[in-house]
Amino acid sequence: MKVLVMNCSPVRNGATAEIVKIVTDCLEKRHDVKNICIDDYDINFCKGCRTCHNTAKCVQNDDVGRIIGQYEWADIVISVSPSYWADIPGQFKAFIDRCTPWCNTHDPHAKISSGKKGYSIALRTGPGMRECERIIASIEHFYGHMDIKCCDSLGLCSVEYKEDLECRREEIVEFCNRLDQMNPEHVPDAEIWDLYNENRELIGKDHVRGEQLPIDGYHLVVHVWIRNSKGDYLISQRSANRPAYPLMWECVGGSVVKGENSLLGAIREAREEVGVELKPENGKVLFTKTRKVIDGRIYNDIMDVWLFEYDGEVDLSNATTDEVAQAVWMNRSQIKELFDANMFVDTLGYFFTEVDKKRR
């Protein structure tokens, strides 16, 4: 699909621009993606003359038509807007005002091609979501009058600088995954999960990765720690092209897919990520944890933490995905150094108390 990602802020290198970059990087492998910034266009204020109500054309000649041309090109429009005094920036508002010739509340009116879908991302400095909701409402009101179908939105609070997005990247990636799953004809080989209840009993429902999990549905996740006879652990660095935690270090891990149990999922993940073939008899579950909401994010997963003993070769050329940049044997001290340097995925901090606890 053709996706237009619009930076509705006049700032080209701030938090809004960083979100546009993350979204573009996440979607461009599966879609034809363009991104634009509102400040790159010359947009005059609406004169309120209402001439367009009779002619379906504005009397002014500036860059509004160029932006509409980008809308016409796109199948999907994603508007990313910061909060300027609890609403969209003035430059974006000026553009919306100038779209009156295309507004469906009067005839005659100009039209863009039908069937377009609209998505919204709002961000604000403060902690409350109400302001984001107001911004999203403004964007969706605009979409509605342009006959663009409103499909999904994301609000991000407590974001002032692009550095504030480091811990919010997964939310943006999940938003992009939902976009993919809402357009399944354009997503090859969608990953399907079995759903369980809180007691780890199958509930007879499937789930497509990226869609919002039902409140009463949980999926299985495995973390796989691989240890050799020297007591070192096989630690992998995420590839630079991973949307979440790029170049961060972690253990093997992932979601258990439909039809698998936890053990089979752990063995498959090791094979896919680091090219290692683990033996079932060499593994054991150290502990299991059911996660619901962590730091405001809905996890709804049942996490099995595995420990496998392995002394064989490690050759990334045997891996079946490009998720890992490198894999290295490390001892506890080396892993601690990565944690202290904020180079290790922070949700794996349990390693020191639950995995390597005998070596404290």
Image: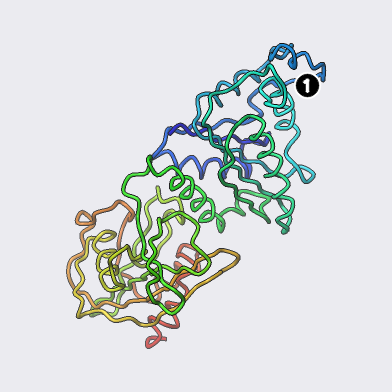
> What x and y, as percent, mark residue 5?
55, 35
**In which quadrant of the rendered view does residue 305 lie?**
bottom left
- On the picture, is 253 further left or further right than 299? left
Q: Nearer the viewer, residue 105 or 44?
A: 105
- On the picture, is 233 further left or further right than 229? right
- On the picture, is 314 further left or further right than 257? left
Which quadrant: the N terminus?
Answer: top left
> What x and y, as percent, mark residue 39?
66, 28
**Residue drawn 70% across the image and 56% down it:** 129
**Residue drawn 21% across the image and 74% down it:** 310
Total count of labels: 1
Q: How was the colour assigned to the protein in this rendering?
A: rainbow
Residue at which label 1 appears: 46
User: What amino acid does circle 1 point to?
Assistant: Cys
Which quadrant: the C terminus?
Answer: bottom left
Density class for disc 1 (Cα within 10 Å; few <14, some 14-19, many ≥20) is: some
Q: Nearer the viewer, residue 110 or 44?
A: 110
> What x and y, as percent, mark residue 131?
74, 51
Q: Nearer the viewer, residue 60 or 53?
A: 53
Identify whether 129 is placed above or below 180.
Answer: below
**Residue drawn 40% across the image and 49% down it:** 240
**In which quadrant of the rendered view does residue 65 lie?**
top right
Identify whether 107 is placed above or below 119.
Answer: above
**In which quadrant of the rendered view does residue 91 lie?**
top right
SS type, badge 1? loop
- On the picture, is 143 further left or further right than 51? left
> What x and y, as percent, mark residue 117?
54, 36
